[in-house]
Amino acid sequence: MSHPATRLAGAAGTLVLAMGLLAACAPDPGTETPGPSASGSATSSPDSTATPTPTPTSSAAARVEIPDDCRAILSAAVLAELDGVPLNDPAFGPSGPQADGSLICVWGDPAADTTSLVTTLSYMSRGPALDMLNALVADEGFTCYTPDEGTRCEKTWQNESYPVTDGRTLYWRDDVLIDSRYSNLAPSGYTAAIVASLFG
């Protein structure tokens, strides 16, 4: 059986990144990301259906540290949009810093029927990241492009029970994956703020 990257290249084209860093993702319906949105709108680059093919980073590059504070990774503007939304309520399960070095940030009110935003920051090397992103493109119809020296893949869909938009956005760069799943909660500039916080 052919590798997903080879299998998809003919149909969607190969998305080759410039040498250097790659990036992970999270929702924001602003300029850099087509993330979650109650209206269901999403923007994507011209090569958004291309197969992701991350380029390995230099071995001399310092490892990006995943923070342990969900608020610290966001800008003041994004935090203002999330004002009043509970963070890491125990009702949603594990959240905050994890034993494996990852960080889970759960924005949402457990009393709400659907509105929530869950972001996981974790370490993932190039091979597994490429396999996962290729599978999302091939099997689930995600679109991918390459903003801010990283690879971003995303998809939105209509919530099955409520008139709101659900979705998932992933952004991989420098062996760090930002994976956000959301429903009816789309702070503008969310992903861009996390990327800026992690990678400068």
Image (cartoon, helix red, strand yellow):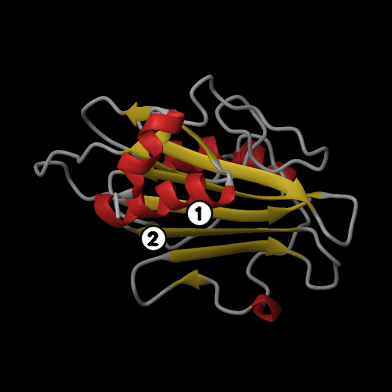
Image coordinates of residue 125 in percent, x first then y, are 26, 55
The residue tagged 2 is 122
Q: Which residue is depicted at the point 64% across and 40% down?
A: 35
Image coordinates of residue 195 in percent, x first then y, are 44, 39
How much space separates mark 2 and mark 1, taking CA atoms?
8 Å
Q: Which residue is depicted at the point 85% across and 72% down?
A: 111
Q: Which mark is residue 179?
A: 1
Q: Is residue 23 above or below residue 102?
A: above
**Label 1 element class:** strand
**Label 2 element class:** strand
Q: Is residue 119 left or right of residue 83?
A: left
Q: Is residue 198 left or right of residue 183?
A: left
Q: Is residue 150 at least partly visible in the picture?
A: no
- Please identify the residue farthest to the front as the structure is shown: 1
Image coordinates of residue 97 in percent, x first then y, are 44, 70
Q: Is residue 54 left or right of residue 104?
A: left
Q: Is residue 58 above or below residue 116?
A: above
Q: Which residue is depicted at the point 35% across and 29% down?
A: 14
Q: Is residue 24 left or right of residue 19?
A: right
